[in-house]
Image (tube, helix red, strand yellow):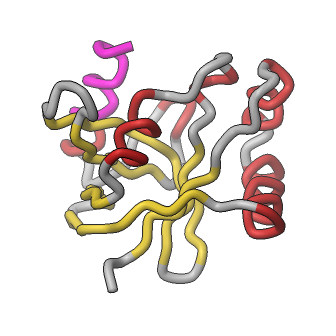
Amino acid sequence: MSDWNDQIIAEFRGNHGKVGGNFAGRSMLLLHTVGRRSGQARVNPVVYQRVGDAYAVFASKGGAPTNPDWYHNLLAEPRVRAEIGDATVDLVARVASGDERERVWAAQKADMPGFADYEKKTTRQIPVVFLEPPD
C-alpha cells in the first residue's frame, strides 16, 4: 500500500493536485496526520467531498474490516494539514454522525459507486470525517 500511496502522492504533487487512473477527475487531497503511537508524520491521499467550507473524507479502507490508520491518528490528534491542489491548509477533524453523516455518505456513494461496494464488504459503519478550518 505504501508504494501505491507514494506513487499517487508524487503524481498529485507533480500535477497541481490532479491524478489519473481510478481517481481521474475526482477531488483528492493529501491528508497529513501524526502517527498516534510513532509520532511520525504521515501523508495519505484521500478523495473528498466539499461540504460548505469543509472537506468530507471517508475512512473506507476499501471495505476492509478495520478503519485506516489515518483515521485513528486524527482521532488522537484532530489538528491536521491537507494539501489541496497547490495549497496547504490547516484543518481540524470532526467525525460526522446521525443525519449529517448519512446525507454526506449517500451523496458520496451516488457520486462514486465504489464506496457503496466498500460498504457492502464490511460490517463496520464507514466513518465520514469533516476537515474544517480552525476557529
Q: Report the number of discs.
A: 0
Split into 4 quadrants, where in the image is the C terminus? bottom left
Residue at image position (63%, 52%) is 128
With 105 as the anchor, is 55 left or right in this view?
left
Residue 69, percent from left and from top: 41, 28
Residue 127, percent from left and from top: 64, 45
With 55 as the anchor, is 73 left or right in this view?
left
Split into 4 quadrants, where in the image is the N terminus? top left
Residue at image position (73%, 44%) is 112
In depth, the one of 38 and 58 nearer the eye is: 38
**Chief secondary structure of the magenta portion:** helix
Residue 120, percent from left and from top: 86, 25
Boundaries of the magenta span: 1-11
Q: Is residue 9 rendered magenta in the image?
A: yes
In depth, the one of 48 and 21 nearer the eye is: 48
Quarter of the image where one finds residue 82: bottom left
Residue 113, percent from left and from top: 80, 39
With 3 as the anchor, is 123 left or right in this view?
right
Up the image or down, 131 lies above or below 11; here it is below
Quarter of the image where one finds residue 7: top left
Residue at image position (35%, 57%) is 78
Furthest residue in direction bottom, as rendered = 135
In depth, the one of 58 and 16 nearer the eye is: 58
Q: Is residue 128 rendered magenta in the image?
A: no
Residue at image position (67%, 17%) is 65
Furthest residue in direction left, as rendered = 40
Up the image or down, 112 lies above or below 22; here it is below
